[in-house]
Image (cartoon, helix red, strand yellow):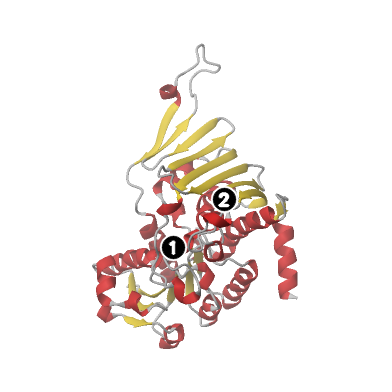
């Protein structure tokens, strides 16, 4: 019988708690054992608080500490889920890899390309298994798209997301302790989130990579937030327009905004192939393609060309993601991981390059050249 994989969770904020809940479910199934919890904020390790977010957790049976070194020295983990805010990453990933621990690193893995390259080097030098926190690849909606486009050519992907600035969630990190926002809404701060493109836009971009392959170039323009409109370091731009060029010739258009006083969520996600269009909604995925004699004698209506690729509940992504990583560690099989760290680096580099493009007045950034320049500078 395969032994349960011993897992430690580092960072018990919103995302870390979601991973913990999935891991406890895997523990009940006998696949994993949560052996360590680590957070720089002692209150986040409180058994009562943990029980409130993860009712099935027996916190008293788990080693809990605010000292990352203690986790490494305990010898009680086979793998770590690292889910701390990207701006607070120091050398945890590098040191954990050097200690021989397999790693799940939540997205964005870093806000700094140099730091991310050091993580990648350490992971590969240690030979440990790794994955990035792109759980949306395990969402059944996105799996349905992946299956549909396998033998088709994607030419365009579009994603528009417009949300109220006020709807940013307060996080669990003690940001004020580190000079950050007093209200703990670090996702609205450029210094903490890297911009909305980096913190949130990386998800649709990574899905496009799942369907289209690697990004080749990036071009972006942002509308900066006025100084008088910045409250508690919420200085991310008003709006973003980013174009990604893929190595297979497809393009992706990402349009985002975070505006004050606009309490109206708008979201639209579409993928276009040479002879079909896919619409991704929260509870359905629909493909539009005429399948009858061509050309048709009369133009078909929407219902005539619509085909449901998937419908149902899309809430299992984090659990399926965690299960795949745990199985990969248990079996020593990297093929079960859909987003290993090296693969995820293309997604991270692409969104960081969007920031670089905006800083260069919309210049097109070719990723291979840009990463190579940074790599030569930092690696000698």
Eye-nearest disc, 1 or 2: 1
Q: Residue 185 has which mark?
A: 1
Q: Position of residue 87 (x, y in %)?
A: 53, 69
Q: Residue 276 has which mark?
A: none
Quadrant into which the N terminus falls: bottom left
Q: Is residue 249 above or below residue 345?
A: above
* Count of numbered labels shown in the rendering: 2
Q: Depth check: give the residue in front, 33 or 89.
A: 89
Residue with the mark numbered 2? 209
Q: Depth check: give the residue in front, 176 or 282.
A: 176
Image check: 55 left or right of 341?
A: left
Which quadrant would residue 152 be assigned to in this image? top right
Q: Is residue 379 visible?
A: yes
Q: Depth check: give the residue in front, 338 or 374.
A: 374
Q: Position of residue 264 (x, y in %)?
A: 41, 42
Which quadrant would residue 174 be assigned to in this image? bottom left
Q: Is residue 112 above or below residue 275?
A: below
Q: Is residue 57 visible?
A: no
Residue extending farthest to the top is 297
């Amino acid at each position: 019988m395969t032994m349960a994989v011993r897992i430690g969770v580092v960072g018990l904020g919103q995302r870390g708690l979601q991973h913990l809940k999935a891991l406890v479910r895997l523990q009940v199934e006998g696949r994993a054992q949560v052996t360590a919890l680590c957070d720089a904020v002692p209150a986040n390790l409180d058994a009562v608080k943990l029980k409130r977010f993860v009712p099935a957790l027996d916190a008293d049976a788990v080693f809990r500490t605010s000292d990352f070194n203690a986790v490494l020295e305990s010898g009680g983990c086979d793998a770590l889920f690292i889910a701390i805010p990207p701006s607070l990453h120091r050398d945890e990933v590098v040191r954990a890899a050097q200690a021989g621990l397999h790693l799940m690193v939540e997205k964005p893995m870093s806000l700094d390309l140099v730091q991310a390259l050091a993580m990648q080097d350490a992971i590969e030098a240690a030979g440990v298994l790794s994955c990035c926190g792109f759980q949306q690849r395990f969402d059944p909606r996105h799996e349905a798209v992946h299956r549909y486009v396998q033998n088709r050519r994607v030419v365009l992907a579009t994603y528009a997301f417009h949300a109220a600035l006020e709807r940013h969630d307060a996080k669990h990190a003690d940001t004020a302790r580190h000079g950050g926002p007093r209200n703990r809404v670090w996702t609205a701060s450029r210094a903490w989130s890297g911009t909305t493109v980096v913190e949130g836009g990386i998800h649709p971009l990574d899905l496009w990579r799942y369907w289209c392959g690697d990004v080749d170039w990036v071009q972006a323009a942002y509308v900066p937030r006025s100084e008088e409109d910045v409250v508690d370091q919420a200085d991310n731009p008003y709006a973003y327009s980013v174009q990604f060029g893929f190595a297979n010739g497809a393009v992706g258009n990402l349009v985002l905004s975070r505006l004050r006083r606009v309490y109206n969520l708008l979201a639209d996600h579409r993928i276009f192939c040479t002879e079909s269009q896919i619409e991704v909604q929260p509870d359905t995925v629909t493909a539009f393609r005429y399948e009858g004699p061509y050309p048709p004698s009369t133009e078909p209506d929407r219902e005539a060309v619509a085909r449901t690729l998937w419908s149902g509940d899309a809430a299992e992504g984090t659990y399926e993601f965690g299960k795949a990583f745990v199985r990969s560690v248990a079996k020593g099989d990297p093929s079960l991981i859909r987003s290993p760290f090296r693969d995820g680096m293309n997604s991270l580099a692409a969104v960081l390059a969007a920031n670089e493009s905006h800083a260069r007045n919309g210049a097109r950034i070719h990723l291979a050249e840009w990463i190579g320049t940074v790599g030569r500078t930092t690696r000698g």
